[in-house]
Image: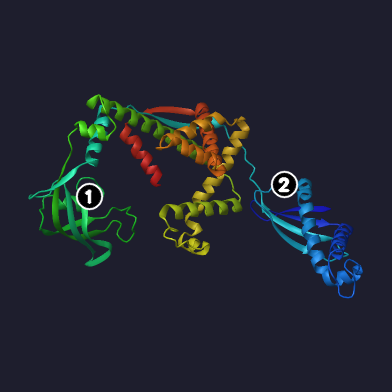
Amino acid sequence: MEVQVESAGGLTRRLHVTIPADRFEREFGERIKKIAGRVRVAGFRPGKAPLKVVQQQYGADARNDAVGELVRQTWPEALAQSKVVPANSPNFQITTETLGQPMAYVATFDVYPDIVLGDLTQMTLVRPQVEVTEADIARLIDNLRKARRTLEPVERAAQVGDVVKVDFEGKLDGEVFQGGKSENTEIDLGEGKFLPDLENGIVGHAAGETFEVPVNFPADYRNETLAGKLTQFTVTIKEVREPKLPEINEEFLQQHGVEEGGIEALTAKCREALETERDKAVTARLKRDVMEALHTMHPIDVPASLVAEEIDRMRAETAERIGANRGGNKLKPEQLRAMLPGEMFEPGAKRRVALGLLIGEVINARNIQFDPARVDAALERIAGDFEDPAEVRKVYQSRPDLMQGLRGVVIEEQVVEGLVATAQVSDVPMSLEELLKSQNQAQVV
């Protein structure tokens, strides 16, 4: 058997395989004999028709079966002979299948890139050093109170902290722009959820007033038509309501799981919650920075086939997140591709594939051993967030895909911890607010 490897550009390879004619004919002959033993041919008893007659009627079927079987048999042999490792399932093309001649086919596939890890001990990282302060705890308690606030209408001008119900219409160069008109919209003044000029322009006006507010859109606004532009908003205030926060009394404490110990117990519970959130955020930031450094240090080509598979996964994740298939109207694959074109996922998909290959290389280079005990601990943490932990554990343990995903998370954590342990790490003081803000921005990006 002859095998030749051809580069088709990048990481794509073509494997040309030629099988001797006698092996092809031998496989064909075996197929014809099997067919002859079971088919009925007019004028002959079952299994007694001459092979030449059977071949005239069933030769094409026998040849196709022989070709398929020889590809199945020779593909592993061809890989072993060529010493290449495919990154994906090959695409086979039969180039010669004429009896009496050597059979030939071409297998096209991608290969993995050659990865040479750099000196990972030179990786530089920043580790936030965050202390949970009394101010952080007070802010959390204040947010708990805001979550249970009541809103009371007031007969005065709106001020920061109030909630106003408004109608507004924005115009650019005298024309109403798309998305610039809304009715009965509630705005928490001072929360920064709307454009600052609009919120600031409402302050000082009372219910029943209609007025004009000039609004500058920021230069980096997502709608390029409005970015950096000065617009004019007509605003009508329908209602001004003042928030009333609940007292921290026995009822409030019970609502937040504090049965005894009063405000001190609530404070302790809030501190514990914030410290847990801090630890998760620090871990997530270190992981993000390790992955970014690993990716930056090793610019590698990635197999196009693996990128395509990752794009499909990311598209499915996005469709699930935005509820594209809810309501019983499941979109067809072509509709989903039209709605979520591959181009929007390609950069992220390439990064995911590259990091997956790099992490695998780090695991091999550092001989990182998978720790089953950590999987059990991770499952306990997940189950502990639900009302019925035993049921959650049961669901995970009955789903190989969920357990495989959990194992992937754990081995990734082990890789990150190992890289952090040997990297150049600088401990930098940071407030909890700064840490969480940077974490939220990273998630948005």
Residue 197 in view (yes/no): no
Q: Which residue is mark 2?
A: 84
Residue displayed at 37% across by 43% down: 441
Residue type at mark 2 is Val
User: Is 192 situated left or right of 380 in this image?
Assistant: left
Residue displayed at 64% across by 46% down: 112
Image height of 146 relative to 346, above or below:
above
Mark 2 lies on a secondary structure that is loop
Q: Which residue is mark 1?
A: 196
Q: What is the quadrant of residue 143 in the picture?
A: top left
Q: Position of residue 111 (x, y in %)?
A: 66, 48
Q: What is the quadrant of residue 299 in the picture?
A: top right
Mark 1 lies on a secondary structure that is helix
Q: Position of residue 145 (x, y in %)?
A: 22, 37
Applied colour scheme: rainbow
Closest to the observer: 301 or 286?
Answer: 286
User: Is 275 situated left or right of 249 in this image?
Assistant: right
The alpha-carbon separation of the residues under discs 2 and 1 comes to 60 Å
**On residue 376, which mark appears?**
none
Q: Pointer 1: residues within 10 angstroms few (<14), some, or many (20+)? A: some
Image height of 411 relative to 14, above or below:
above
Residue type at mark 1 is Pro
